[in-house]
Image (cartoon, helix red, strand yellow):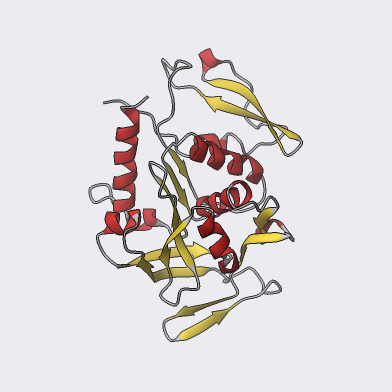
Amino acid sequence: MRFHFMFCLCVLTLTFPLASRVSAKNPETGFLDRTLSLHGQTYKYQVFLPENWTPKQKWPIILFLHGFGERGSEGKVAAVQFARVQRIPYFGICFGMQMAVIEGARHLADIPRAGSTEFGPSPDPVIGLMTEWTRGNAVERRNAETELGGTMRLGAYPCDLGEGTRVRQIYGAPTISERHRHRYEVNITYKSRLEQAGFVFSGMSPDGELPEIVELPNHPWFVGVQFHPELKSKPFEPHPLFTSFVKAALDQSRLV
């Protein structure tokens, strides 16, 4: 069975507001020009059209990879909203999880000005700079004045999985260990409001202070993780999250 992966495609093509770096092409040559109106601004972007693509075809999945910076973030949030509303399987890794939380906060939890302090001061910083975490028996601390060099939360950390959640079923274990590389995190003070809006924090640090995984239970497959599963995935021994995600793609491809 043939199906197309949307590896951050909608995300990547929305990251060039007003002036795309890719030269304009028509559908026959592989790209289609589009515009997006969002919060009073108009964004230009391009959609890649696979060979033999027709307007009736749909993308079965969206994979949102990690990254940094404000550039194109509003387009990325719009891509998450597209995946959620259209019920397209979505997998957000690191930054992809953070953008999913911002989108959900704005459109599900009624926090319209939700944002990330990575982009500057925010009235509702649902994503914020990590200031303290535990590594072994030591506590590491950072603040906004700390130099960026060497300030990431790096390496393997444990994560407790919620009973009855999708990720608990995928892993088949109550506790996992995954590798991290991030400086910002989901702001724990917004956890209850996001849960009331439908988000499930299915993975948490053992002390319950750091959200590691979020999911939407009423969606075909919507998972965001703060860690990097690709660092523990091999060609002939894929990470279980990727295996489940690809299965969701196969299931979705049968519906489109």
- Find the residue positioned furthest to the bottom: 137
Above or below, 46 against 201 in this view is: above
- Residue 237 position within the rendered picture, expressed as x and y whole percent measured from the top left: 24, 51
- Residue 10 position within the rendered picture, expressed as x and y whole percent measured from the top left: 53, 34
Residue 126, located in which quarter of the rendered image?
Answer: bottom right
Residue at image coords 48%, 16%: 55
- Find the residue positioned furthest to the front: 196
Q: Is residue 113 left or right of residue 182?
A: right
- Residue 123 position within the rendered picture, expressed as x and y whole percent measured from the top left: 73, 60
Residue 54, located in which quarter of the rendered image?
Answer: top left
Residue 239 shows in this picture = no
Residue at image coords 74%, 61%: 121
- Quadrant in which the N terminus appears: top left
Above or below, 140 against 246 in this view is: below
Q: Is residue 208 left or right of residue 22?
A: left
- Find the residue positioned furthest to the right: 40
Residue at image coords 47%, 59%: 226
- Residue 202 position within the rendered picture, expressed as x and y whole percent measured from the top left: 40, 61
Above or below, 78 against 118 in this view is: above
Residue at image coords 38%, 56%: 229
Q: Is residue 161 left or right of residue 47?
A: left
Residue 151 shows in this picture = yes
